[in-house]
Every structure is written in C-alpha cells, then in structure tokens.
Amino acid sequence: MNAIDLHASLPEIVLTSAIMLVLFVDLFLPDRLKAWNGLIAMAGVLGSIVALITLVGERRSTFGGMFVLDGYALLFKFLFMSIAVIVILISVNYLDETVRSSQGEFYFLLLTSFLGMMLMASARDLLMLFVSLELVSAPGFLVAGFRKKDARSNEAAVKFFLFGVLSTAVMLFGMSLIYGITRSTNLVEIAGALKNTGHDSLVAASILLIIAGFGFKVSAVPFHFWAPDTYEGSPIPVAAFLSVASKAAGFAGLLSLMFVGFIHQTEVWAPGFAIMSVLTMTIGNVVALQQTNIVRLLAYSSIAQAGYMLLPFAVVSGAGPSVLRDAFSAALIYILIYSFMNVGAFAVVIAVSRKQPSNLISDYDGLVQREPGLAIAMVFFLVSLAGIPPMAGFWAKFFVFSSAIHGDAAWLGAVMVVNSIIGAYYYLTVASRMILRPAEDTSRIGVPYPIVVAIALAVIVVVAVGLYPNFFAHFTPRSTLIAG
Amino acid sequence: MSGFDTWALSLGVFIPVVGALIITVIPKAQEAAIRATAVVASGLALVLSIVVVARFHFGESTRVFQFVVNKSWIDTIGARYHLGTDGISLPMFVLTTLLVFLCVIYSLKTMPNPRNPKGFFALILLLETGMAGTFVALDLVLFFIFWELVLVPMYFLIAIWGSERKEYSAIKFFLYTLFGSVFMLLAFLAMYFRSVDPVTGGHTFDMVALQGQNFGSTAYVNLIFAGLFLGFAIKVPMWPFHTWLPDAHGDAPTVGSVLLAGILLKMGTYGFIRIALPLLPEAAHDWAPYIGGLAVIAILYGALCCLAQKDIKRLIAFSSVGHMGFIMLGISTLTQTGINAAIFGMVAHGVITGMLFFLAGSIYERFHTRQIDDIGPGLMQILPYMGGILAFAAIASLGLPGLAGFWGEVFALLAAFNPAAGLNTGLFRAYAILGGVGTILTAGYFLWLLQRLNLGKASEAKLGEHLDDVRPVELAAWAPLLVGILALGIYPAVILDVTNSAVNGLTRLFT
C-alpha cells in the first residue's frame, strides 16, 4: 500500500486548518470583533479553492481507494467551495446583527459540514460515504438551532435531528447488508460482486434502504417532512446552506452510489426513483402554491426542484451507456445550476429580512421601488428557477427533459412539464408582486456589501450560464465517474 | 457571399436587444434619450430587414435559405447557431421589424399608465429580438429559445401596463403558452434522439437536416406531432385552445395587442409551416382533416363570439380567432394554394388587425371606454378621420375584394375545394362551404360594428368635448399600414411571388 497522498487531500487539509483556527482564535477575540471569524473562515475556503486549482486535471486515489480525486470529485468540490463563499458572505451581517453570540462556533460548524461535503465528493467507499454524510449532517443539526431563544429554531433543530438519525440508521442497515452480501465496502468492488446477482431480493431491499437514507438528505418525498419546518426555523443563511450545499452533497453521494456501486441494478432502483421523483416534484409544487411565507415557499420549491434532479435516475432502467451518460450529466448539471439560483434567491431573502423579519411574501410587494437592484436580481433567480430561457435554469430543465426522452420515458417528461407550469405560476406570482403591487413600507432596505457581492456572484452565474451553456456542458463529460 | 450577408440577420435580431440593454443603463429621468434609443434600435432593425429584402434573390431561389450563418454553439448536444431566411420566413421577418418600429413611433406620444418609458421600451425591444429570431432560426434549440424569449416581456407588458384584470390575463397567457411550448420541446427532443446528422453522424437539431429523417413507428411520429401541435396550436390559437387570447388581447396595452395579434400569433402558424409540415409530412397528412375541422370551428365560433361582444377590443380579439382559422384551414389543405394563402393571410392579418388594435387604443384613450355603445353612435361626426380609418380597416378585415384581407381568405377557401392528394375532398369541400358561411358572418359583425359605432347621430355632450382627431404621430405610425392594406389588396403578388417557390418546395412532400 502506497503512502498517503497529501496533495490529493490538500484542499481538505487547508479547510481543516481553518476550522481549527476559527475555534482557537474565537477564544481571544473581544465581542465587538467576533465578525473576524468570518474572515478566517473565508480565508480558509479561498485557500482550499487555490489548493483545488493545483489539482485540476489530476486523477489520484489514496487511503486504500477510499478517497478518490477525479474530475467528478473536483467538480463537486469547486461547487461546494463556491457555495461556501456565498454562504459565508450572506452570514456575516446576519450573524452580527441577529445571533450575535457564538459566532466562532457557527463558522466552525459550518466549515465542518463543508468538510464533510468535500469528503463526500471523493468517497468511493461505503464507510467513507457514511462518515462524510454524518459529518455533513451533525453540524447541520446544531446550526439549525442557532437562534437559541427562538422556539421555532429549537423545533427546527430537533426535527432535523430526529429525522436525520432515523434515516441514517436505516441507511446504515442497508449498507451493512450490502457488505454482508459482497464482502466489500469499495464501490467498484461492490459493483463487480453484484454484477451477476440479478434480481436478488435482499440486494434490492438493501439498495432501497440506502436510497431512503439519501432521500432524507435531498428532502425527497416521502422523507421531506423535516425540510419546511427546519428551513423556516433555522437562521436564514442556514436554510440556504441546507437547501443548497447539503442537498448537493446528498446528490453527490447518491450519484456515485447509483452510477458506480449499483450500476448493474438499474432495473431495481430506477422505478423507485420514478415514483420518488414524481411524488417529490408534485407534492413540492402543489404545497408551494399555498405558502404565504417566502422561506416556506422556497423550502417547498426546493423539494420540487429535488424531484426534477431525481428524474434522470428514473430513466436508466436497463439502459445502455449513452442513456446512462446523458442521465448522469443531466442530474449533475441540474444540481450545479440549481445551487446557484437557489442560493441567490435566499441571499435576496436575507437582505429583505433585515427590514422585515417576518419573511411574508407580502413583504415583497413593491420591492422594485424600494431596492430596484434587489428586485431585478430576484426576478432573475425566480425566472431561472421557473426554467425560462435565457436563464441558466432553462438549461437545467432542458437536459433533464432530454434525458427523459432519450430514456424513452416521455411520460416522466410530461409529468415534469405539468409541474414546471405549476412552478412557473408561483415563481412568477412572487416576481410580479415585487413589480406590480404598491409597497406598504416604502423605506429603503440598505443591502450590506457582503450580500451585494453574494447576489452579484449568483446573478453572474445564472445569466452567464444561461447565455453560454457550453460553460457547464463542458464540465460534465470530464467528470469521469462513469465510464461511458 | 459577403460578410454583410452572413451577419445581416444576426444584426437584425440582436440590435433591438442591444438597444434594450442601452436603455437599462440610461437614467430614468432622461426620457428623450430613452425614446431616441428605442427609435434608433427598432429603426436600424427595420432598415436591416429592408436591406435584406433588397439583396434577397427572388424567383426560384426563394426556396433555398439565404443570408445563412451556421456556427457551432453548444457542441455537447450538437445545437448550432444557424440562421437563414427563405420565401416563407422573409415576409414574417419584415412584418416583425415594421410593426415593432411603428409601435415604438406610436408610443412616443401615447404611453399607457403607469408611465415608465424606460421599462416599456426595453421590454418591447427585447420582445422584438425574440419574435424576429423565431422567424429566422433554423436550429430547433435556437428556435425554442427565441420562442420562449417572447414570454417574459409580453407577460410584463400586459401585467404592468394593461387594464382591468391585467395580472390574471398576463399569467393566463404565460402559463398557457408555456404549457404548449414545453410539450413542443419534448417533441423537438424526440426528433433529435431519432435523427442522424449527415455530417457528424451524431444527432441533430438542424431543421434542414431533420427533413426526410425516419423518426420511427407511425405511432411514435404521431406522438411527436401531437407535441408540436400542442405548442403551435396554443400559440395560434386554434379552437379550443383560444381562451387565453380574448383576455390577453383585451387587457394588454395597445401596442401589446398590436404585437400579440400582428406577430405572436403568427409564430404558431409559422411553426406549422416551418417545422411540423416539412419534418413530419406523413403525420401532418393524417392530422390535416382534424386541423381543418378545428379551423372551421374557429372561423364560425370566432364570428359568433364577435356578434356577442360589447367591448371593441374583445371584438377585434375574437375576430383574430376567426382569421387565424382561415390561415389554419389554408395550411390544413397541404396544397400550394392553401399554404400561399396562409402566409398571405398571416401578413394581411398582421397589418389589418394591428391597425384595428391601434384604432381601438386611440379610441379608448379619447373616450376612456371600450364599450361600443358608449363610444358610438356617430363617431364619424365626433372624429371623422378616425372613423374613416376605422371603416377602412374594418372593411379590409371583413375581406372586401381589392383590400388585403380578401386574398388570404378566398384562396384558403379555394384550396379547401381541392385539397392535397389523399385527403377527403368531400370533407374539405364541406369545410370550404362552412368557411364561406364564416365570411358572411364576418362581414355581418364588422358592418354591424360600423353601424353602431360610426353611423347615427352623436350626442351633444360628446360633440361638446372637442376630442382630438388623428394626431400626426398616430398618422405616422398608421400610414405604412394603411398603404400596406391597399397595396396588398391591389397587388397580392408582392407576397405571393416571394412565397410561391418556397411553398412549392414544401408541398411537393404531399403530392
């Protein structure tokens, strides 16, 4: 066995150093300088991005094959770190003004969760997947309850925690069965061992148990009940983090499990995903229609969006390599684009909540008169979430539709069309309220500099990818996870 | 081919959106600069389209695409930046740039509430890029992007500057059209995955390369056609998908209605002619009797609804349902006469109904009502010029020989008497007769409209208000349309000579 490849894990090492540093420095910072913790966290993330850049084009494997660095892992790591930049930017002022205490611990927990995501992207081993999933979740339980004196925040944390441990237990059971059958935890070896098992019911059961665990992470119906309450109760940057980064991490794990470990069992899991996808998008969208609170609206919308991301998994039943490749890239592209448009929408919500902490949709009436830039940015994000060209969200939907047609699952495409129309309705309703309705409170909001930067970053990605889709379309063939 | 020929269409399509971007950075207070930018951008697009006409090769060569640009765009899916125009799309392209320019001129003095020239002109220019692009795109993905680009600006034009139930009408328009177009996208993808690119051997979205490809079993091809049909038929709109139209037209601001009726509806009929018929000729042949049937229902239904309208804008809106029915009847015959008639009808309807919506807007501005009984009687006494122009446009719309409305409808009926080989002649002749009844009803409701509105004795109160008659700006915006109505009526070959050879190339598939 070779020595441990430190360069391959350099981004994680840098991030871990920043985590330690935040915790240590926080002890010595006087109260009025607590916001400096954010600077340290940001420096750590940027350092990690630099370390990632040195690894571009590499293909390495270390820790006995548990940790793999390839195009796929790099792509997700870049995504996670970009989202980390935005989440830190939108947290700084919010923490300083709303939560105040324990800022050091907040960044410590946030970065720890991101560390789990980084590991998740590289995990090609059941144990590694499990450990990194826990590393993503456990700090999440704590930050969800960070508004300690607010009963709803407590509820958010407890609900998240209970659902989390239950689903983890279920998933772990599934993993242990797989280990029992295949005598391996390595995904490639598992795929080899499962190649000729056919429709073994024990294998099928354990795969479904594992899917259930990840279903919780990506808030797929019927494992979604925690999401709206948790999003609403958490500090809003945490809701943004959970609905974007944490969800993307779940998909990163799901993609490598399904398209590497269980690649020969597509007939078993694809129909399960079909049911899950249809239920997730339909229930998410229909319930979103009735929301009056913008955070809950975004919560249900992000459930619906997860349904679209699950759809490509559903079309690969017994499919050939070209359909597999298309489905894989469709899910991947959707996750990438969704992350930016959704975190952008949350950034706007944080900005508005500075003046109107109630987060009602009616607070957005007449926003264009109060903060034109903010309102236009929100229109961009909403139109993109609705999947209308020329925004990035259109291409996300385009590739998912494309995978549905390619996999001869036009009926799933039709279900998604109907859902897109429902989605377009509530996204546009919010957009047009901002422009058409008169504002009750006409005072300006005053958006702090870090949030402006965060929103600008997200707008640039959403518009640039919309106009020049080659930008993302080029990435996915290089994500060499599946041999096409 | 010179550099200009390669980039002429791209310039015509994208100059408006550049104008829109410039407008967004001009401060709101500088209204003169905003207006000037809008006039220059839409004017340049119009000039470019006229230059394209001047350099266009007519005669037999209208069947090949000219001014072609074909560059790689999204390599991973083989979508290309492919624009070009032929005898079928050229009239629509010119109509688009002309109508948008006239709308901008009209809006210089007449701005609907809430006044916000910045947003208004920016959205109109963005709309122009979408509409013009739709008519010259030769790649399905590109076509779809342009097609959808129209939705958001039109949504906001109706929702912000509209009247009455504007938000409801705007969202209804948006969701209805989106619903159809996403099914259309699924159909595009279905064709893509069953196609073979003659050059690369991969799949293709190219409209030219997709012709004559085998997309699989008859059932599958019919399913693809159904997707296309939903997208196009909702846009046209064909009965029974027309319910968004009276609301959207009725509540849109004047120029919104003009562009909706003048151009947006034609995107649907153009889609049938450009995509559905040439790419899926067998399915089109199977569907033709049903499409013809729906078209005839639209003609009669539109006319009957018009007879019941009390609101002048809704009346014109319902008259569009009927006129679009004639166009679809022409297309459904799959004959050279029928499709020529359809394209002629598209241009004529754009000019005439655009004119009628302008008039409705100007009348509303003066009387603050759209109820026919509150405006009339005696418009000829109150506003003699306005009343005269209204009479002219209404008579053109009802299809009087010698004016533009006549040729499209009479040729469509003639074509229905002799539909393409294999279609049920008896059935289509019945359609022709029913369509003929429709023309009588159309004449009926327009004459009745004129009777209620123009004739009779005006009340003293209205005469005492001394309302403005046609203003110079209005006349400037309307004159090209009025000339067009007369010119197309007297010399229809202006359009037919352009379309004929291209249509012939298409209808060969059905003989």
Image (cartoon, rainbow, N blue to C red):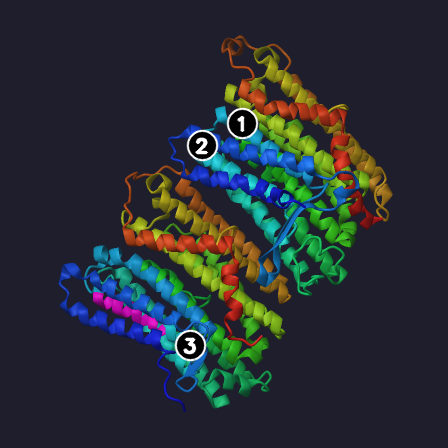
Q: Which mark is residue B105?
A: 1
**What amino acid type is highlighted by mark number 2?**
Ile
Magenta region, mostly helix, strand or loop? helix
Q: Mark on residue B197?
A: none
Vertical placement of residue B70 versus B303, above or below: below
Mark 3 burial class by Cα count in 10 Å: few <14, some 14-19, many 20+: many
Q: Is residue A332 left or right of residue B231?
A: left
Are labels 2 and 1 on one chain? yes
What kind of residue is marked 1? Ile
Q: Which residues are magenta?
A: A104-116
Q: Which residue is mark 3?
A: A122
Label number found at residue B34: 2
Give me the residue at 61% from left, 74% from top: A321
Which of labels 2 and 3 is toward the front? 2
Taking the magenta stretch, the answer to whether it contains residue B498 is no
Out of B138 and A100, give the one closest to the viewer: B138
Q: What element does badge 2 sit on?
A: helix
Q: Residues within 10 Å of mark 2 (few under 14, many from 20)?
A: many
Q: Chain of mark 1?
A: B
Residue A319: x and y in percent read: 62, 73
Question: Residue B211 sits in which quadrant?
Answer: bottom right
Q: Is residue B447 visible?
A: yes
x, y percentage for residue A245? 38, 65
